[in-house]
Image (spheres, rainbow, N blue to C red):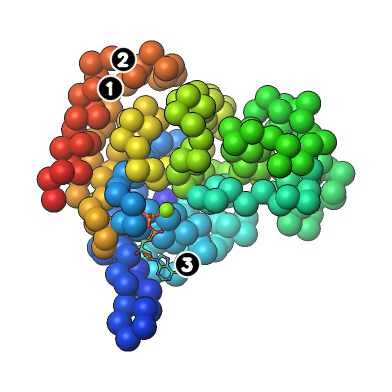
Amino acid sequence: MALTGVGKWFAAGQGRVEALRGVSFSVQCGEFVAVVGPSGCGKSTLLRLIAGLLVPSEGEVLVDGAPPGVARAAKRIGYIPQESALLPWRTVLDNVALGLEVNARRSRREAREQAWVQLAVVGLAEFAGRYPYQLSGGMRQRVALARALVIAPRLLLLDEPFAALDELSREAMRYELLALWERVRASALLVTHSIAEAVALADRVLVLSPRPGRVVGEARPELPRPRAPEVERSAAFLAAQAAVRGLLGAR
Ligand SMILES: Nc1ncnc2c1ncn2[C@@H]1O[C@H](COP(=O)(O)OP(=O)(O)O)[C@@H](O)[C@H]1O
Ligand SMILES: [Mg+2]
């Protein structure tokens, strides 16, 4: 996945709101990249551009060497939007199956079988028949993850996936996410305003300026994998956090 000189602006009254300016970076195959930046700097816009839901005002976005729409149609992109859009009238199982059903080549039965397997992987098989409102916030995020992963994506896009969770669930979910990601071996791009989350998860942390978002620097947490919660007490973790904090301050 690669962005080259990507800018995005929106019409607003007489003028325009510039969300992103001159953003260039790439995510290698199997790499986990996090993007950190203040609220409103264009993080969600960035992910929507890569998911093919928005078109850049300038520059180019390529996923597997093609425009994002191609990768999206081929089910190579798993996207978890900021407001995880589970359908309230569908059971947990049918929410996960939704990721597959849109693909005409799969029957509903096949889709449900695969969804079932994916639910077991995220530890929610026994909740398959429940509805989203009957689950905790953390469980709902695991359903959203299962729905993104069930298509076996090559690129996983995560928009502040744990922002709505309490502190304890948020920290536990980091390592659940890592375990799932290590299973699928997809590339991952996660945006967040949490420095700790970015450092705990990523091979590389890109730092964005306030709006219009520009990449102002990059940190590489030197943390071995697989990672466990204890990593957050290591000197390397604290050093990486300090590096990111420095980049966020230095603009
Ligand atoms: N569809 C849109 N129309 C107009 N302005 C938008 C639209 N989407 C985002 N913006 C503006 O672009 C900026 C970046 O938004 P967003 O990408 O949601 O930031 P973040 O996710 O980092 O908080 C904000 O000023 C926001 O109001
Ligand atoms: Mg956002």
Q: Is 54 positioned to the left or the right of 117 in the image?
A: left
Residue 122 location, x and y as percent? Answer: 65, 28
Mark 2 vs mark 3: give the one in front. Answer: 2
Which of the pair 141/181 is nearer the observer? 141
Residue 233 marker: 2
- What's the amino acid at mark 3? Leu
Residue 54 marker: 3
Q: What residue would you read off at disc 1?
A: 237
Residue 238 location, x and y as percent? Answer: 24, 22
Residue 251 marker: none
Query: In the image, is residue 112 above or below residue 239?
Result: below
> Residue drawn at (23%, 53%), measured in percent from left and top?
209
Q: Is 129 positioned to the left or the right of 155 in the image?
A: right
Q: Are marks 2 and 3 in contact (CB under 8 Å)?
A: no
Mark 1 vs mark 2: give the one in front. Answer: 2
- What's the amino acid at mark 1? Phe
- What's the amino acid at mark 2? Arg
Query: In the image, is residue 241 above or below residue 186?
Result: above
State which tag comes first along the sequence, 2 or 3.
3
> Would you say residue 86 is visible in this rendering?
yes
Characterize the local packing of mark 3: few (<14), some (14-19) or many (20 or more) Cα atoms within 10 angstroms.
some
> Would you say residue 5 is visible in this rendering?
no
**Which quadrant of the structure image shows residue 202?**
top left
Q: Are marks 1 and 2 in contact (CB under 8 Å)?
A: yes
Q: Is mark 3 within 8 Å of ligand 1?
A: yes
Instruction: Name the element at disc 1.
Output: helix
> Residue drawn at (55%, 51%), measured in percent from left and top?
83
Which of the pair 176/249 is nearer the observer? 249
What whole-number distance in Å separates the C-alpha atoms at marks 3 and 1? 35 Å
